[in-house]
């Protein structure tokens, strides 16, 4: 790693991004790639192909960045004018690159289509740029070193940009020593503790270390905390020590290191013990089963789910006693308990989770209004029911139930609740 | 619409976006919402919570925009400092807003958790700002009019931002006349036809009209086509005529107008006829049931799904004959057929869909390799099975099966297949 981290900026061009027609996947991809190499992307600017916007944004960034990456605008059509605008701003003229021209011609020969005049435009490059070969498209990437800075221009289609970035851009930056050789941070995942409570909990520990950068990221009931030393690599052991200290402080709320998801963690625990899981889902409507079966190899552990949206299905398919529903209503602790027990029994499984509730906006009563949720966990030792009251909207209630239910099981499996 | 369109800019704050940990969904969402109201977002700036970056970017945008929207940075932790930085740049002081404080306190009372001191920070607002109530979180949105411009600050979580944007921001902008009142375009949704085939099909029709703007957007087996006249509103009738012509040309591939999703369309058809639906899902793992139960009011139509990941569940819970599985294997047309018939029978439903297949990467045989999918549709008239072979990866196979299965049912319900 360099003594002082370089400043990386990204300009993503294309009106389709601003119109909400296409997600800005380049930001996510390039941000992630750089993060893995110890670099935090400083900023991202999404603009249209209007010349005045390109000029203004390029000048702003070229002033402030050590490495400026642009995506898009290298295509053959008239609205692709990034190259012209930027060459102009750098005081460079565009020259026809014979080897780029030949590789475009070769490409059209291979796919058996005539090369249009438009594509000839793609063979021009700023005079001091070198071409980065693009095996998946006609527009090559461009690499330009000037004034101690680097400009990297990449084609817009992800299947062209991504291999080019990994095979040509990253190795060049690594040779210059401007990015780290491998991942340089530690990610600590927590669950069941809010972002501000987590920060309050961990801050006294982190404050003991100089140059320790800390970033929190909350998503779907989890909070990830990433730590790294700002002065670079070679401190993996120290990071690991700090991580272990976090693990101790967090206790049951420590989910894991790295990138493993909650469903993966639960499935791995069960697979290690050669135990099995079944579900009975009312208002979650199959969401828990769906998240579990997104994981390859889920079939080793997961037997199935009865999505019982009607009382009839709860009774006839799952075997919940009719009188339990009549006495307590479908959204009640006794019905949640019976659902979990019956799921384990009918699907011959060691563990079972059940979910019944009113996701809203309709349904519910005074005693159990919309947002009331019962989750039950059946284990070889017995069955427990939890009640929740959430005011967060139908889809958010389903999603929170998914994470809460899997976390109930995880805590049981790691023996900490 | 205003005589001269206003300039809208968006600043999305959050290091998690730059680190590639979270997609910049706010750009996609807000860009799309504004486009529907006749506005093209001029630019989007993604920056971290560093004060110098906020200051510099805010000054740049406030100079150029009529409406500046910011997202994120309103949370309770120390790295949430957008409000402070922007108030400072505007020469405003932050004042404690008693009604915001009370609604935060009320929120914590409801969820039964103690309010931390951090959260008190969220009750401050720039002196000339008004709060936009946020029923789904602690941080309200803020609306500030100054120097003939509007600053709109929104909380980062999508389930907070989106209702706030639709229920409070858009109506305010509409009252000012800065956005169009309704959608200024017509959206035609198609399914089962690729983007370039759709374009080829419709282009001769569209070419007959001057000033007709056409945009295609492909997602998850559907292609949406949006048309509008570039010279503005007041031509709804003509757009509708063109839409009807598209409908005629597309026949069975015409899905609908507007924004209704495939699960909504299917549920509405069934609700109109007072008919019911059940599912039997093997490799889709509850995904079809989950998509259906995302729709409010699904319980009127949907009885349930047996997610039968093991053969035992197919046999014991769903009632597929054991010998059918033994003879044909679980991934076969006869088993798909039996699953659909049994789903309709055990869950007492008019229609049933079943899905069995190998989503991969593991599983399969020479005759039925990973990617083999059988979908069966049971109707009051009989049962049909379709076989597919998809080479697109586990999650994509699950998702494609969801759309294909619902479309099979839709075509049956509209009587066009």
Image: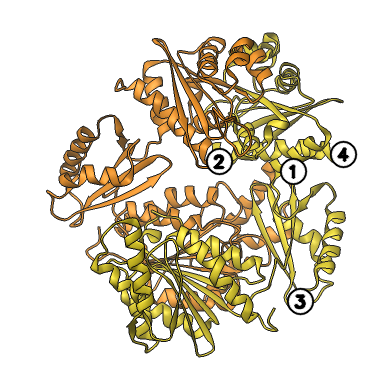
Chain colours: A yellow, B orange
Q: Callout 1: residue from which chain?
A: A
Left or right: residue A404 versus residue A414 is: left
Q: Callout 2: residue from which chain?
A: B
Q: Marks 2 and 1, how far apart in space?
A: 18 Å
**Looking at the rendered structure, which numbered label has been put on residue B395?**
2
Image coordinates of residue A161 in percent, x first then y, are 47, 64
Residue located beneath label 1 in the image: A265
Task: Locate residue B409: give its quadrant.
Answer: top left
Circle 3/circle 4 CB separation < 8 Å: no
Image coordinates of residue A210 in percent, x first then y, are 80, 76
Q: Evaluate whether label 2 is on the same chain as label 3.
A: no
Q: Callout 4: residue from which chain?
A: A
State whether residue B105 appears in this view. yes
Residue located beneath label 4 in the image: A415
Task: Locate residue A121: give its quadrant.
Answer: bottom left
Quarter containing the N terminus of chain A: bottom right
Q: Evaluate whether label 2 is on the same chain as label 1.
A: no
Q: Callout 3: residue from which chain?
A: A
Left or right: residue A143 versus residue B269 is: right
Precedes in sequence: disc 1 or disc 4: 1
Left or right: residue A181 versus residue B196 is: right
């Amino acid at each position: 790693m360099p003594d002082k981290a370089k400043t990386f900026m990204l300009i993503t061009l294309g009106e389709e991004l601003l119109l909400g027609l296409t997600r800005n996947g380049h930001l996510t991809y390039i941000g992630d790639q750089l993060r893995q190499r110890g670099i935090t992307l400083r900023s991202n600017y999404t603009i249209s192909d209007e010349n005045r916007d390109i000029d203004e944004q390029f000048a702003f960034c070229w002033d402030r960045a050590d490495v400026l990456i642009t995506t898009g605008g290298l295509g053959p059509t008239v609205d692709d004018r990034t190259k012209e605008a930027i060459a102009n701003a750098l005081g460079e003229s565009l020259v026809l690159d014979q080897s780029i021209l030949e590789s475009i011609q070769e490409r059209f020969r291979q796919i058996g289509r005539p090369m249009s005049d438009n594509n000839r435009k793609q063979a021009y490059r700023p005079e001091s740029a070198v071409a980065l070969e693009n095996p998946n498209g006609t527009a090559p990437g461009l690499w330009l070193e000037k004034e101690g800075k680097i400009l990297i221009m990449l084609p817009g289609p992800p299947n062209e940009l991504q291999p080019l970035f990994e095979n040509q851009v990253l190795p060049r930056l690594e040779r210059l020593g401007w990015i780290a050789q491998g991942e340089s941070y530690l990610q600590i995942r927590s669950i069941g503790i809010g972002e501000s409570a987590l920060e309050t909990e961990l801050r006294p520990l982190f404050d003991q270390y100089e140059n320790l950068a800390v970033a929190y990221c909350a998503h779907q009931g989890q909070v990830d905390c990433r730590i790294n030393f700002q002065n670079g690599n070679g401190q993996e052991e120290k990071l690991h020590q700090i991580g272990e200290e976090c693990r101790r402080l967090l206790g049951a709320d420590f989910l894991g290191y790295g990138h493993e998801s909650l469903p993966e963690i639960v499935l791995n625990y069960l697979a290690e013990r050669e135990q099995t899981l079944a579900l009975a889902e009312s208002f979650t409507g199959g969401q828990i089963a769906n998240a579990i079966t997104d994981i390859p190899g889920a079939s080793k552990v997961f037997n199935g789910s009865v999505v019982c949206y009607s009382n009839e299905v709860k009774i006839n398919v799952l075997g919940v006693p009719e009188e339990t529903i009549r006495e307590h209503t479908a959204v009640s602790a006794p019905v949640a308990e019976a659902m979990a027990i019956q799921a384990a029994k009918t699907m011959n499984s060691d563990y079972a989770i059940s979910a019944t509730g009113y996701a809203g906006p309709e349904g519910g009563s005074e005693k159990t209004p919309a947002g009331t949720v019962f989750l039950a966990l059946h284990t070889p030792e017995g069955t427990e029911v939890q009640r929740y009251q959430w005011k967060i909207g139908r889809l958010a209630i389903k999603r929170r139930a998914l994470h809460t239910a899997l976390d109930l099981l995880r805590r049981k499996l790691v023996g900490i609740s």
